[in-house]
Amino acid sequence: MAEQKSIHGLWRSRWLFILAATGSAVGLGNIWKFPYITGENGGGAFVLVYLACICLIGIPVMIAEVTLGRLGRQSPINTMHALTKDQNANRLWGGIGWMGAVAGFLILSFYSVIAGWSLAYIFRMAGGAFDGATAESVGATFGNMLSSPETLLAWHTIFMVITIGIVARGVNKGLERSISIMMPLLFLILVVLLGYSMSTDGFGAGFEFLFSFDFSKLTGESIIVALGHAFFTLSLGMGAIMAYGAYMPKKSSIGKTVLTVAFLDTLIALIAGLVIFPIVFSNGLEAGAGPGLLFQTLPLAFSHMPGGTLFGTLFFILVAFAALSSAISLGEPVVAWAVESKGMSRVAAATWIGIVIWILGIGTILSFNLWSEYKLFGKTLFDTLDFLTANIMLPLGGLLIAVFVGWAMNKADVKEEVKMGSPLMYTIWRFVLMFIAPVAVAIVLVNGLI
Ligand code: PFF
């Protein structure tokens, strides 16, 4: 097909795409969700299944999603619209773009609330709120925060304003610039924290927890959680990576670039585990604390360690950076669409979309306090949104992307765009995309629904 141009600009280099896509991928999913689901699912064997899901399904689907973006060079909605036309495919495929846009709205609305917790904890940690803490006192601090809609709203508002401020400045002045500051700092803080955790008594136990494979602890449910998480952590299935692919320079090989992003995302999740579990174990605490692992177990652990205030503060700065670099990728696809199709300026588009997402976020806030009794199929609004997006919409989006690229598109167009380098790699990728990924994802989807 004819070469398209992006009206939003391009990443200045392949490395900036890698940093931006890694920024999108590395987020609350790596630092908050991965450690606690690993804790809940027994450790090493779960990690192994998760790695298999990343390699077998995540990477092939990510290559497909970036390819779509770079071919279309527009927001996911318009890219899908243009590609279905160009490829003479059924117009219903355009639904991939629309569903992704809805998923982006919903995810960002709750993601911002949780990211707000990490902002709040930077100040609590730095202000010494956890000095001499006990299990009861950290539980009470977390509980008090959740039960106060005003506190949650204030931090959600601050986080949304920063996110929208970056997206409003555009690809080069906003996204690229903020990423080039945040990502190196994120790596640096992570390495410092790894050094710190290596100096604790619990490092051996933490290492063993992550890397000793006890398959007796693995259940069918863990496999589904691992596959669902592979989509969430790589930001797949909703167009974030497609939008970033639209700004990727033409020369770069998509296969190699995606491998680098997936490698960095996985490495960072594993390092986050190697930071968190040793600190938890060296204080004799439990790994299976669930979602509270980061906001209750960890502050308690830090409060009993030398330098805990400093390293604890650094830790929550790390979480906030990771969340912010993902949040901008959740906002970008819809803002880009409003600029292209509604003739809005970036600032106006980002502001209006930001306001709608901010309002949606209030629902998540209230589901932790005033509305905590209102449940749909036994889930609060926040749990419903998390389930609907991570377990249904992202895998469904990923499945449709795999089928569209694998079955509906012209083979030669796809082959020319991915520039896989080695013919063998290309054949393997195509096979996995056409057969293995759709079947595996369909199984997860059906299980998620039941
Ligand atoms: N990958 C992000 C994380 O691991 O926290 C979450 C995410 C970002 C999911 C962007 C989906 C997305 F489009």
Image (cartoon, rainbow, N blue to C red):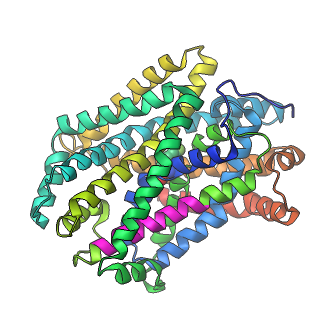
Query: What kind of secondary structure does the magenta stretch mostly adopt?
Result: helix
Question: Can see residue 34?
Answer: no
- Where in the figure is residue 362, as x and y percent of width and height? 29, 33
Compared to 41, does 77 lie above or below?
A: above
Q: Nearer the viewer, residue 56 or 175?
A: 175
Q: Relative to 327, is 363 on the left or the right?
A: left
Q: Residue at x 85, y 62 (%)?
A: 422
Question: On the rendered structure, is 400 left or right of 146?
Answer: right
- Comparing 96 with 347, the one in front is 347
Q: Is 205 displayed left or right of 295 in the figure?
A: right
Q: Residue 441: x and y, percent? A: 61, 59
- What residue lies at 34% left-to-right and 45% top-to-bottom? 115
Q: Quadrant of residue 161?
A: top left
Q: Quadrant of residue 133?
A: bottom left
Task: Judge whether 161 appears above or below 110 on screen.
Answer: above
Q: Position of residue 359 (x, y in %)?
A: 34, 28
Looking at the rendering, the stretch of residues picked out in magenta corresponds to 263-279
